[in-house]
Image (tube, helix red, strand yellow):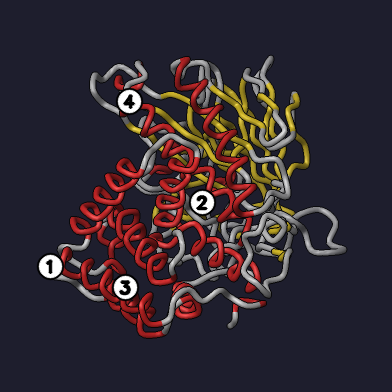
Amino acid sequence: MLRMPGRMRRAGVTAVFAGAAAAGFVAAGLVAALIFSPPRAFLPAAGTGAPALRIAVAQIDGAALRVSYRWREPRPAMAFRVVPGSHRARRWSVEDDGFALRAGAGVDTIVRTDGAPFAAVTLIVRPDETRPPKDYSPVAAYGEGGALVYTGHLLPLGEDGARIEARFDFQPAPGNAATAFGAHAPSLADWRSPTGAPAFVYLGPLAPRITARSAALVDPAAPAWARAEFQAVSARALDHFTAAFGDAMAIKPNLFLTAGALDEPGRMRFSGDAAPGQFQVTLEGGAWRSPSAAARDTLRLSTIHEVFHLWQHAAAPPETAHAPGWIHEGAADIVAAEAMVALGYWDGAALEGFMARSRRACAFGIEYGALAGARRRGDFRALYGCGVVIGEAAARAGGTTASAFWRDFLIMAAARGGYSEAMFYDVVAARTDRTFADAVRRFVRTPHARPETAMQALATAAAAARAGAGARPLAQGGRR
């Protein structure tokens, strides 16, 4: 699952989306390398010296943290984006006297009770017993004596609603180390993510396994077969996507695998969170204890899904924080499914079974409302299922695979420095025609009393576009 980091302050780190042309994957006329500069946080403006904010994170007891904020200038309040489930009200506390944590509409705020401005405050942040729905955990227990910290939820907001620039100091508990990207040290001082976006940082006793493609930190609490499978599948997926999409990784990605409660018989939950250059996976439920066919299938497909999110993040962020989830989740699902076939894990029948399940999930998710409102309604299955349906239709209309369609989309997004729903329809029109692009837009925005009929109509429109024009490769810069 990918949740885009949203709008940041400052401009930033450069990644090269290159190599696809040499591998024979870029349509005629496209530049061989596209430079992407995603928005980033944490960096002070040139000449300002110290950052506006320094955050010291100390591990105090397992996954519990002491988080101290030190501002360059006093401020009247400190606001954070809300974490679902009233998380901060339940799991955060202010250690200093004379402060209050108040929940509001869309933001949680820390203020002095006397209304005076302040330049320093210290919080105690504890892990939740359950992960927030469709969001990152600010801190989660990670193996025995370890904690996985997501810096995005520790960063307060500026007046413009963007996360404030900050530098971090991470201090693990005695005997532990801090791990993030290529760093593995007794502590991290004056740290910022090399991607310029919020990131995961591990504090604990485990050391990463470094390979040519990645740095993986694997919790020994996960079943042995799952640990081995995760590392093998992620390595093969990284090789596969590098060959198919080019080496877009400006830094060696971080992969995290851990296990939650594995005691409930028959339960099998795979939870994945992706950030630029990183993803983390949590396995929960007793069904993971043995390597059944269903468990292997789920672990393989879902891991490849998360690996593809690395390429999406590297290519381009959304142009706004509200880009529709069906774009990135549907893309990751269908590209992962095609990769399952390419890597020999599935045959054609298994792929068709996946497509049929996706169609059912789409139909269920849009039965009572348009796909455009699915996230607001909490119909998250629709984002994945309908995203697959749309990707399949767009690929058929253009006479290509879904992976080829999404490759062109990422190239165009990188050239523009971001993507949007409108740009998606432009890519569809460029590869097929505007009539089919309008049919996709109607499918997304129209409530469908009969979802199966709507999906069939979309497939029919794709066939008509294919019969009328065939595939239209993009030309340089994304225009024909």
Q: Which residue is mark 2?
A: 110
Instruction: Please name the residue shown 17% across and 71% down the image.
Output: 448
Q: Which residue is mark 4?
A: 293
Q: Amino acid at mark 3?
A: Ala
Q: Which residue is mark 1?
A: 450
Of label 3 and label 2, which has the lower sequence position? 2
Residue 194 versus residue 11 in the image, above or below:
above
Task: From the top left corner, tell me how far across and down residue 276 is, in percent.
Answer: 60, 49
Q: Is residue 52 visible?
A: no
Q: Amino acid at mark 1?
A: Arg
Of label 4 and label 3, which has the lower sequence position? 4
Nearer to me, 107 or 374: 374
Of label 3 and label 1, which has the lower sequence position? 1
Of label 4 and label 2, which has the lower sequence position? 2
Residue 458 placement, left or right of 217: left
Of label 1 and label 2, which has the lower sequence position? 2
Nearer to me, 364 or 193: 364
Nearest to viewer (mark 4 / mark 1)? 4
